[in-house]
Image: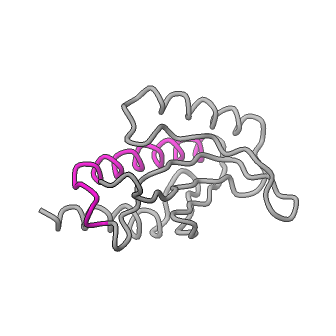
Amino acid sequence: MRDDHPTDWLVILVEGDASPSVMSSIRSAAQELAGQRPWVVGPPSIVDEPGAEGRHLTGLALSLHTAFPPWGDELDREVDRAYLEESQSLLRETCRISAEHETNFIVEFAGEMIGLIEAGRMDDGVAVGLIGEWERTLNGRG
C-alpha cells in the first residue's frame, strides 16, 4: 500500500442529544475497544463536537484506508479483512450501547449516511449494504 493511500471514516453518531450515561458508555467503549486488538490505523476515536444548526455530535469514529476505486486494488486482502473485523467490533459495541440505553445511532461511511442502529440492531443498510457487501467482496477476491 502506498504512503498516500487515502483514508475513509466509519462514523457512528447518536441520533439526537446524548445523555450523560450514553456519553459515559461511549467513552468506556472506546477505551475497551482500544485494548482489544492491534488496530490497522488506530482504535476508534470519540466524536464529541459541535455540529450544524446547534446540534452536538456524539459517537465513535474509525479511520480506514479506502477501498474505493482506484485504490481498492492496492488494498491488501488481509488488511481489508482486518478493517472489516474492526468495523464489526465497533458496530457490535454500538449495538450493545443502543440496546442498553434505548438510543438510536446514525451510521455513516465515507461521508454518506448508510443506515441506523435502532434498539440494539443494525438496519439493512448497515447489516446488508455495508457488512454483507464487504464480506461478499472479500470472499469474491479469493
Of all residues, the one furthest to the front in this rendering is 3
Q: Is residue 71 left or right of residue 140?
A: right
Residue 62: x %, y % from top left: 51, 48
- Identity of the residue drawn at 64% across and 54% down: 13
Residue nearer the viewer, 4 or 122: 4
Q: Is residue 123 left or right of residue 70?
A: right
Q: Is 62 above or below relative to 126? A: above
Quadrant assignment, res 116: bottom right
Magenta includes 79?
yes
Q: Between residue 79 and residue 48, name the one nearer to us.
A: 79
- In the displayed orientation, state which residue is furthest to the left: 142
Q: Position of residue 53 (x, y in %)?
A: 86, 65
Residue at horizontal 69%, vertical 32%?
Answer: 24
Q: Residue furthest right?
A: 54
Q: Say which residue appears at 27% left-offset and 51% top-offset.
A: 81
Q: What stretch is highlighted in magenta?
A: 72-100
Q: Which residue is painted at 38% across and 51% down in the image?
A: 3
Q: Give the dominant element type of the magenta stretch: helix, strand or loop.
A: helix
Is 135 one of the magenta-colored residues? no
Q: Which residue is more in the foreground, 25 or 45?
A: 45
Vertical side of 39 occupied by 80: above or below: below
Q: Residue 84: percent from the left, percent from the top?
A: 34, 52
The number of numbered discs placed on residues in the rendered structure image is 0
The quadrant of the image that shows the N terminus is: bottom left
Residue nearest the viewer, comparing 96 with 71? 71
Q: Position of residue 131 (x, y in %)?
A: 37, 61
Q: Quadrant of the C terminus?
A: bottom left
